[in-house]
Image (spheres, rainbow, N blue to C red):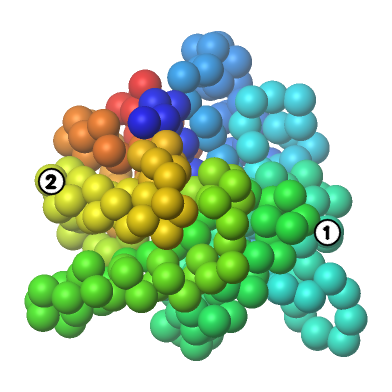
Amino acid sequence: MTSKRLIAANWKMNKGVAESQKFAEEIKAYTEQNNIISCDIVICPPFTSLDAVHKKIDGTKIKLGAQNVHFESCGAYTGEVSCSMLKSCGCDYVIIGHSERRQLFHETNELINKKVLKSLDEGLIPILCVGETLEEHQDHITEAVIDEQLKSCLKHVSAEQIEHIVIAYEPVWAIGTGKNATSHQAESVHNFIRKKINKFTNEEKGDRLRIIYGGSVKPSNAKELFSSQSINGALVGGASLDEKSFIEIINSAL
Ligand code: PGA
């Protein structure tokens, strides 16, 4: 099983350019002073701050990610951004299929699949988000929901390509609610995902897959979540907006 954790900051629609640059400088100083090598750090600012953040972190171990992408290369798609544009801003990662995109912008598994395939083709690492709603959680159908999301969103993804994907298990009932899954709950879903990926690939790719948890991760619960070896990091929303709390979460993952 992969041991290096990945902590990603998903700023959502927050922070302008100056604020983003200030954050990037502080995280950069922290990683350099503390020689952080046992954990990968990814910052996912809004599109408008990608270039500015990249200029601050270029040459460091901190990586850049976007929060969304379009599946076409270019053309008449007003308001959309392509993989090559993200790469030209210095992105290595892209969040795909976040529950806010699914719920508020009606993204389907089919659309998410197109974005995953395009990102892989263009050499971006997708952080593919899956997770059940509160209703599905209460109906005890979490595994069936995740199974369907994985099957549809990873359609036509080869066993080799699976290695270049990060899966974020984000129970929708835990996002922005302050209620997080326990390490035990997350671990059981992470193990389910690994089993499924092993089955899809006919190989043990699932065992090596990096599966991170997202949903109200904060300094006060990060240690408990990272007590599970099956939780290979975190996708952090609200608590990643503040430098100090984001750094505390990274420290808990080391
Ligand atoms: P949250 O968001 O940490 O604010 O719950 C997580 C996410 O949406 O990725």
| Closer to us: 145 or 23 | 145
| Closer to us: 132 or 50 | 132
| Side of 135 where 18 appears, left or right | right
Residue pictured at 85% horizontal, 51% vertical: 88
User: Would the CB of label 1 be found within 8 Å of ligand 1?
Assistant: no
| Side of 138 where 230 appears, left or right | right
Q: Which mark sits nearer the N-terminus, 2 or 1?
A: 1
Q: What amino acid is labelled 1 in the image? A: Ser
| Within-10-Å neighbours for mark 2: few <14, some 14–19, many 20+ | some
Residue pictured at 43% horizontal, 45% vertical: 203
x, y percent for residue 58 = 76, 31
Res. 1 image quadrant: top left
| Closer to us: 104 or 14 | 104
| Side of 99 where 16 appears, left or right | right
| Closer to us: 202 or 252 | 202
Q: Do we see residue 244 in this rendering? A: no
Please tell me the numbered disc located at residue 182.
none
Q: Do we see residue 81 in this rendering? A: yes
Please tell me the numbered disc located at residue 84.
1
| Within-10-Å neighbours for mark 1: few <14, some 14–19, many 20+ | some
Residue pictured at 60% horizontal, 15% vertical: 32
Find the distance from the CA under tag 2 to the CA under tag 1.
39 Å
- Position of the C terminus, as image quadrant, is top left
x, y percent for residue 112 = 56, 74
Please tell me the numbered disc located at residue 184.
2
Q: Secondary structure at mark 2?
A: helix
x, y percent for residue 61 = 64, 25
